Image (tube, helix red, strand yellow):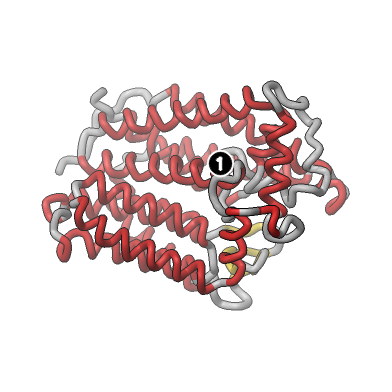
Amino acid sequence: MVVPTKRTTPDFILMIVTFTLLAIGLIMVYSASAIWAEYKFNDSFFFAKRQTLFAGVGVAAMFFIMNINYWTWRTWSKTFLLVCFLLLILVLIPGIGNERNGSRSWIGVGAFSIQPSEFMKLAMIAFLAKYLSERQKLITSFKKGLIPSLGLAFLAFSMIMLQPDLGTGTVMMGTCVVMIFIAGARVSHFAFLGLLGVAGFIGLIASAPYRIKRITSFLDPWSDPLVTGFQIIQSLYAIGPGGLFGLGLGESRQKFFYLPEPQTDFIFAILSEELGFIGGSFILLLFALLLWRGIRIALGAPDLYGSFLAVGIIAMVAIQVMINIGVVTGLMPVTGITLPFLSYGGSSLTLMLMAIGVLLNISRYSRL
């Protein structure tokens, strides 16, 4: 395999779509969080200012990575993965890892912290792309190809579940499955492992009472409207009145202490309430454009590593968007997962912008 050297201009459509989503996200984070921020911190711009800082760091990282040959990720993928595994261990140690909302998922000092599980997603994509590009002929073998690749992903998933963080773990595992399937794994092997996966997923749900409550509330949120069904019901109360054109930017009613922390996982509900069906559809259109450009970059990559790397990034974004929108609209059980580029959160936003930087670099060597 030869390191690609001939560079062109990056994919400007992808860049424009990313900046559009980011700009809308900054506006919506302020709109969704202003009331809560004023109440809790006596500063309506508290979350907006922090998100702007995160965006600045993320954009700087995106432009830096955009100008680094994507083969650098191939060279350092093992080191990156080992560092992320180490961080996943450290985050579980009391006094090092910070606990929020029942999950020990953050490492940091005070209000500034990182979420190692977010960066594990990109580390796993980079390493798995290297593994699959070097062993693609073995991927049809259950023992020599499929089990080693899925086994490593499952190890990372298990460590993330110790925090616990089912949402992030599901996105990472789903991304790995997509990459392995695209690499040529046999459908029959996936069918067998799929049955085991479903059984394991049911076991995970049954092992934690709060997960069982989330499932029952998803099926019938009105069975417990003040506890387990509260978020889904309040989310639907936000989306419904939005109608076609919405109540107007900043005019949401559900952000007045009805929908808990609306600037994070449920920001799409506030966006739909204020901007209506038109605004929500425009966001989905932007994500569709982003995925289209990502797929085009994957198809035009000069080598297998670039293709698998692009596929992994696009799969990660697509799965995360589908889960978030599914939860907000009541089509899936509630799980803590952010909406890429829009939701408040430093680690998630920085990771996504870094991933776009990798995509933009691959596009500079595209054959299409």
Q: Secondary structure at mark 1?
A: helix
Report the front residue among 156 and 146: 146
Q: Residue furthest left?
A: 137
Q: Quadrant of the N terminus?
A: top left
Name the side, left or right, on which 15 lies relative to 275: left
Name the side, left or right, on which 137 lies relative to 76: left
Query: Picture coordinates of residue 236 (x, y %)?
Result: 68, 41
Tell me what residue is drawn at x 49 percent, y 42 percent: 322
Q: Residues within 10 Å of mark 1 (few under 14, many from 20)?
A: many
Quarter of the view holding residue 252: top right
Report the residue marked by disc 1: 325
Name the side, left or right, on which 221 lies relative to 364: right
**Mark 1 residue type:** Ile
Tell me what residue is drawn at x 38 percent, y 66 percent: 199
Tell me what residue is drawn at x 50 percent, y 47 percent: 351
Whether residue 344 is visible to the viewer of this picture, yes or no, is: no
Name the side, left or right, on which 159 lies relative to 363: right
Q: Quadrant of the C terminus?
A: top left
Tell me what residue is drawn at x 18 percent, y 52 percent: 186
Q: Residue furthest bottom?
A: 94
Query: Picture coordinates of residue 103 (x, y %)?
Result: 60, 67
Quarter of the view holding residue 360: top left
- Is residue 76 depicted above or below 48 in this figure? below
- Is residue 356 depicted above or below 108 in this figure? above
Query: Picture coordinates of residue 2 (x, y %)?
Result: 16, 40
Whether residue 222 is visible to the viewer of this picture, yes or no, is: yes
